[in-house]
Image (cartoon, rainbow, N blue to C red):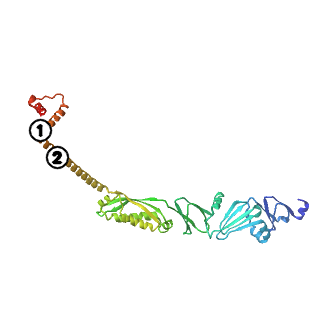
Amino acid sequence: MTILDKVLGRERVLVKENERAVTLYKGEIKAVLMPGEHWLANRRGRLEVSRHDLKNPEFVSAYEKALFDKLPEVAARHFTVVRTGRTDVAVIEHDGNLHAVMAPDRKLVLWTDAGPWKVTLVDTSADLAIDPALMRRLGQARKTELMSVHPVVDGQAGLLFVDGALARTLAAGVHAFWNVGRMVQMKVVDLKRQSLDVAGQEVLTKDRVTIRVNIAAEYRVVDPVKAVSAVKDFSEALYRALQYAFRKTLGALTLDQILEKKVTVDEEAAAKVRADMAEIGVEVSDIALKDVILPGEMREILNQVVSAEKQAEANVIRRREETNATRSLLNTAKVMAENPVMLRLKELEALEAIAGKVERLTVHNGTGGLLNDLVKLREN
């Protein structure tokens, strides 16, 4: 700085290539300085220089309003202003890369020289859905604060609710929506065949025996909109329908009738369940009464009954066999009485059987006894 500069009250201000500077003199906005050497008036130290590094391209300054009000042409030359409306989202790209995503009712001032800039305004009042390509870019750039992502896998249907109202049904895939201004919710409904067990349900039979039954049903959702909108929980509705139908049906039967039919299901009860569930978009296929569980004392009584029945069956079989054996003996006796030779052969068979089991056999009376009969047999 020369003596003349000091006398004139001038100050040298150097602005680098990566900088911009806003100057004020006596507290008043004067200019935006580009890179280079500048000589500015600074009497009594009234010059103020605010430097800005373009590495941070967003212009945040207490002098922003004054600059735009007093030097509008300068502001238009140096700054890019982005504003969003009440339902707008702004996607701001810097030299081809995502820089920021702005929510509705926001303003952002950028140094134009830090660009190039590309601003895309999205009106979310028409559709909250985000294009899949943009969704992936936002995810990769980690700019997801204004985005909600909802995956729907094969075999499922996604129901989109906006502000509590059903908007549409979504197929399998990954879906993203702007979560600005309105509440976005997703309910995923499984469309595959499923099973439901109703276990341990107490039923009072017609003959006043308290039993517990296990019921199983297979179902699938065929109309996800009905299934979700008609009832709070369609699986709970099926559970209650099975409970009510089988309590009513089994309560009209005696214990013996239930035990005889436990592998099948009352068709009237099953038809009622299927009809009720069809009204809310649920198709019920197989319904089965799996188990009938008796109280402890009733099991003991039934065990005794079964034991008595089996014993009676065994006695019948034993008497039948004894009768058959007696009848056979009677027939044999008749044959022997009519045929003495046959009787003697039976005696010889008995003698042979006995002789095979003893070491010595003594025959008395010689041929006058049993051997005499052998001679007679030969002569005959």
Name the residue carrying label 1. Answer: 340
Residue 319 - label: none
Q: Secondary structure at mark 1?
A: helix
Q: How many marks?
A: 2
Quarter occupied by the C terminus: top left
Nearer the observer, 277 or 285: 285
Q: Residue at x 65, y 61 (%)?
A: 134
Q: Position of residue 16 (x, y in %)?
A: 81, 58
Nearer the observer, 204 or 74: 204
- In the figure, is residue 59 to the left or right of 207? right
Distance between the alpha carbons at the discs numbered 2 and 1: 20 Å
Q: Quadrant of residue 33?
A: bottom right
Residue 71 in sight here: no
Q: Position of residue 150 (x, y in %)?
A: 57, 61
Nearer the observer, 17 or 288: 288
Which of discs 2 and 1 lies nearer the camera? The answer is 1
Residue 341 in sight here: yes
Residue found at the very far right of the displayed protein: 4
With respect to residue 194, does 339 lie above or below?
A: above
Name the residue carrying label 2. Answer: 327
Question: Please, what is the three-letter code of the amino acid marked with disc 1?
Answer: Pro
With respect to residue 132, does 335 lie above or below?
A: above
